[in-house]
Image (cartoon, helix red, strand yellow):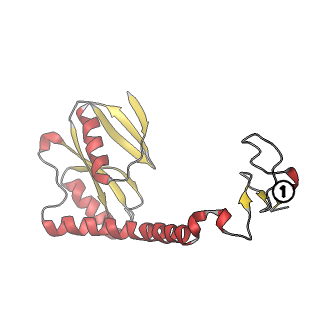
């Protein structure tokens, strides 16, 4: 029996923990592609799962040699996505740890930080741009007018009351102008 699960994680440790919880329930990950997991039914707790960010993509010679080494040690490669690799080992064969010393664990976390750093910087630049622009408030920008809620229309700054309802908000049809033709 198989089951598909769509789930997104931002923390690989929580993802790893979830995969091991699924394994404890008898659902073993057989494949992964962009947030879609394929599970097959099996013995509860049969496998221990680990997720690792490789230094190079899985098809790179250095990564391939490392994965071959793991396979010789009884570790099965379940899936790979970019530089992330999903691994499992039979629980009956003993504990499954990828990092035997503090240095290799630190190097792994450093790779993760370096992978996420460009995204964090882009997010910071975008946030600074929004907040330095008056918070994105178009009313504070005299030449732009106010957004109408429609992607191609904009309310001109001169607002004249036309109705008494909240929906009118003092805007006439003639106050709209087309931004794009």
Q: Is residue 59 visible?
A: yes
As drawn, the residue found furthest toward the right would be 174
Q: How many numbered circles are shown?
A: 1
**Residue annotated with mark 1:** 175
Residue pictured at 25% horizontal, 41% vertical: 20
**Quarter of the rendering occupied by the C terminus:** bottom right
Based on the displayed image, in which of its 4 quarters is residue 140 positioned? bottom right
Residue pictured at 82% horizontal, 54% vertical: 160
State the residue in front, 126 or 90. 126
Based on the displayed image, in which of its 4 quarters is residue 106 positioned? bottom left
Q: Secondary structure at mark 1?
A: helix
State the residue in front, 88 or 25. 25
| Picture layout, residue 22 above or below residue 168 | above
Position of 162 with respect to 8 (left or right) is right
| Picture layout, residue 26 above or below residue 15 | above
As drawn, the residue found furthest toward the top would be 1
Q: Position of residue 97 (x, y in %)?
A: 16, 54
Q: Position of residue 86 (x, y in %)?
A: 32, 51
Residue pictured at 28% horizontal, 59% vertical: 67
Position of 127 with respect to 31 (left or right) is right
Residue pictured at 81% horizontal, 62% vertical: 180
| Picture layout, residue 46 above or below residue 135 | above
Q: Position of residue 89 (x, y in %)?
A: 21, 46
Few, some or many C-alpha atoms within 10 Å of disc 1 (few <14, some 14-19, many ≥20)? some
State the residue in front, 124 or 68. 124
Based on the displayed image, in which of its 4 quarters is residue 82 positioned? bottom left
């Amino acid at each position: 029996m198989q089951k598909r699960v769509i789930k997104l994680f931002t923390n690989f440790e929580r993802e790893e923990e979830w995969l091991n919880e699924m394994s404890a329930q008898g659902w073993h990950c057989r494949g992964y592609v962009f947030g879609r997991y394929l599970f097959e039914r099996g013995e509860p707790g049969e496998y221990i799962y680990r997720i690792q960010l490789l230094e190079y993509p899985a098809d790179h010679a250095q990564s391939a040699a490392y994965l071959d080494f793991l396979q010789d040690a009884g570790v099965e490669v379940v899936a790979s996505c970019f530089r992330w690799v999903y691994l499992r080992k039979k629980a009956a064969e003993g504990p499954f740890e990828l990092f035997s010393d503090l240095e290799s664990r630190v190097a792994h976390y450093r790779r993760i930080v370096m992978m996420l750093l460009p995204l964090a910087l882009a997010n910071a630049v975008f946030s600074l741009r929004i907040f330095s622009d008056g918070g994105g408030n178009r009313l504070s920008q005299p030449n732009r007018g106010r957004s109408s809620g429609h992607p191609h229309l904009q309310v001109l700054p001169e607002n004249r009351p036309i109705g008494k309802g909240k929906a009118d908000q003092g805007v006439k049809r003639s106050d709209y102008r087309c931004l794009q033709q």
